[in-house]
Image (spheres, rainbow, N blue to C red):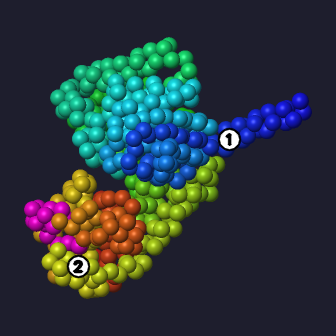
């Protein structure tokens, strides 16, 4: 009897430890699998602010297991083969088991057992409300962000007046909320936190559409009361920090509040940092402050971010958000104003060697781009205008492509008749030149002065501002 009690106690202790550490297991079987690699993609994790993938191999019985550590509920994705993937929802401590036909992975997946209840409902929800491909969605550039919306919302933003659009967006939200309420009645095994996350998807997606209409699309003469829609939702909710719809809206809302108000003479990102400090609270505030600082460090000069950076690392109660931030700060130091730019020698589009040292004595504008990056193409189009207005003997434009293939790069450069010096980085974002300049996203650009050192960047990068700025560096 004592032995039995000891075993039971050991089991309970193990289960308790499993839940407390947030260890989560996702396992399954893919019938008929020939492709042996399977990947788990975890979204922007709170602690490191970046997406990452975990790969594993199917065993001889076509079984797999992912053991991950989570501290918050997450929407993640499993991909199998070149173009097949499934979204799923996990909570810390879950042990999720699935089964699928490898030849039709995304359509045959079935989540087993009591802990599969959330994902059985989630798959039904995704089938009822499929998400449009990112490549088809439309974008508005406003403030420091790109506001992305589905094509049907994009067309309604263009066609409808404010009242009609608000009614249309409300009807979409209400239909989703009614559907979720029906799930709660029909599937008692789903968790309260899953229900909250699913409702948040509907509510903050709606809020994002409203913000895109009222702010990102540059509607004129809009009644300020239009933005009262934000009173219907919470700005700070620590349970939702990992919810993609919530993150998308809060980022946009802080951006809107900063640019629509009487903004102090701050760098845009530093200003948004201090605005978030005023308007958000708790873990939510720490997350978005850290996110703003990381984006600011990556996109503007470090000197403009120092006060906000110091304020955060010294005052935040959530030090877990400083880990990734400190890493970006240390990397940015390598490209700090006044530091020597990394030297390189690469072949241009005609096969001729090009070295950064060739241009000592000139101002050099270096950007990284690819044809699949729409914002990159917009920026390159803008620089064509600038190139025609500055002295070519004193200002050099170097465009480094992170395209997948050299052929696509050459075809694009010639088809668009792009000027400047064109280089191709074998390996794309993982190439040596991208690592040397610490490029982790695009578009990315740098300005190098006549002495070969990094120069400050202007706060704005429209054609006239960039033109004037480059001329002043001569």
- Crowding at mark 2 (Cα within 10 Å: few <14, some 14-19, many 20+): some
The residue at the point 42 percent across, 55 percent down is 295
Secondary structure of the residue carrying numbered label 2: strand
- Comparing 141 with 22, the one in front is 22
Indicate whether 202 appears above or below 48: above
Across and down, in percent, residue 449 comes to 31, 78
Q: Which residue is mark 1?
A: 18
Across and down, in percent, residue 431 comes to 35, 69
The residue at the point 42 percent across, 35 percent down is 100
Indicate whether 394 appears above or below 10: below
- Crowding at mark 1 (Cα within 10 Å: few <14, some 14-19, many 20+): some
Q: Is residue 226 left or right of residue 96?
A: left
Indicate whether 288 appears above or below 169: below
Quadrant for residue 414, please give it.
Answer: bottom left
Answer with mark 1 or mark 2, whichever residue precedes in sequence.
Answer: 1
Across and down, in percent, residue 62 comes to 47, 44
- Comparing 81 with 170, the one in front is 81
Quadrant in which the N terminus appears: top right
Mark 1 and mark 2: Cα distance apart in space: 54 Å
Secondary structure of the residue carrying numbered label 1: helix
Q: Is residue 421 magenta?
A: yes
Q: Verify CB contact (< 8 Å) between mark 1 and mark 2.
A: no
> Marks 1 and 2: which is nearer the front?
1
Quadrant for residue 214, please give it.
Answer: top left
As drawn, the label of residue 241 is none
The residue at the point 25 percent across, 62 percent down is 403
- The range drawn in magenta is 408-423
Across and down, in percent, residue 21 comes to 67, 44
Q: Is residue 279 visible?
A: no
The residue at the point 79 percent across, 38 percent down is 10
Q: Which residue is mark 2?
A: 347
């Amino acid at each position: 009897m004592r032995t039995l009690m000891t075993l039971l106690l050991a089991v309970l202790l193990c289960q308790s430890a499993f839940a407390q550490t947030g260890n989560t297991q996702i396992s399954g079987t893919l019938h008929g699998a020939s492709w042996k690699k399977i990947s788990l993609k975890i979204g922007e994790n709170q602690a490191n602010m970046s997406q990452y993938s975990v790969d594993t191999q199917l065993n001889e019985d076509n079984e797999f297991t992912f053991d991950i550590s989570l501290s918050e509920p997450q929407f993640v994705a499993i991909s199998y083969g070149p173009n097949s993937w499934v979204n799923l929802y996990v909570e810390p401590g879950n042990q999720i088991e699935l089964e699928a036909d490898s030849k039709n992975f995304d359509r045959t997946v079935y989540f087993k057992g009591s802990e599969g209840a959330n994902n059985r409902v989630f798959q039904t929800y995704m089938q009822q409300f499929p998400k449009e491909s990112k490549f088809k969605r439309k974008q508005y550039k406003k403030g420091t962000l790109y506001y992305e919306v589905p094509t049907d919302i994009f067309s309604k933003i263009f066609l409808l007046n404010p009242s009609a659009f608000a009614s249309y967006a409300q009807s979409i939200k209400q239909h989703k909320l009614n559907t979720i309420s029906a799930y709660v009645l029909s599937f008692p095994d789903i968790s309260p936190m899953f229900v909250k996350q699913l409702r948040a998807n509907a509510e903050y997606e709606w809020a994002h559409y409203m913000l895109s209409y009222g702010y990102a699309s540059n509607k004129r003469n809009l009644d300020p009361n239009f933005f009262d829609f934000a009173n219907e939702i919470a700005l700070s909710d620590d349970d939702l920090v990992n919810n993609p719809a919530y993150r998308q809206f809060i980022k946009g809302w802080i951006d809107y509040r900063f640019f629509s108000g009487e903004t102090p003479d701050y760098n845009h990102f530093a200003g948004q940092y201090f605005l978030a400090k005023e308007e958000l609270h708790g873990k939510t505030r720490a997350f978005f402050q850290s996110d703003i600082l990381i984006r600011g460090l990556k996109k503007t000069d470090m000197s403009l971010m120092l006060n906000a950076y110091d304020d955060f690392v010294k005052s935040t109660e959530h030090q877990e958000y400083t880990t990734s931030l400190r890493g970006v700060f240390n990397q940015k130091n390598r490209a700090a104003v006044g530091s020597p730019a990394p030297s390189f020698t690469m072949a241009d589009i005609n096969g001729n060697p090009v070295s950064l040292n060739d241009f000592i004595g000139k101002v050099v504008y270096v950007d990284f781009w690819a044809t699949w990056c729409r914002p990159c193409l917009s920026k390159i189009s803008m620089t064509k205008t600038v190139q025609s207005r500055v002295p070519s003997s004193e200002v050099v434009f170097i465009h480094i492509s992170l395209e997948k293939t050299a052929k696509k790069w050459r075809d694009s450069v010639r088809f668009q008749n792009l000027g400047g010096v064109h280089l191709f980085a074998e390996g794309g974002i993982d190439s040596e030149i991208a690592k040397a300049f610490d490029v982790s996203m695009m578009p990315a650009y740098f300005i190098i002065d006549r002495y070969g050192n990094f120069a400050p960047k202007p706060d704005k990068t429209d054609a006239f501002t960039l033109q004037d700025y480059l001329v002043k560096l001569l």
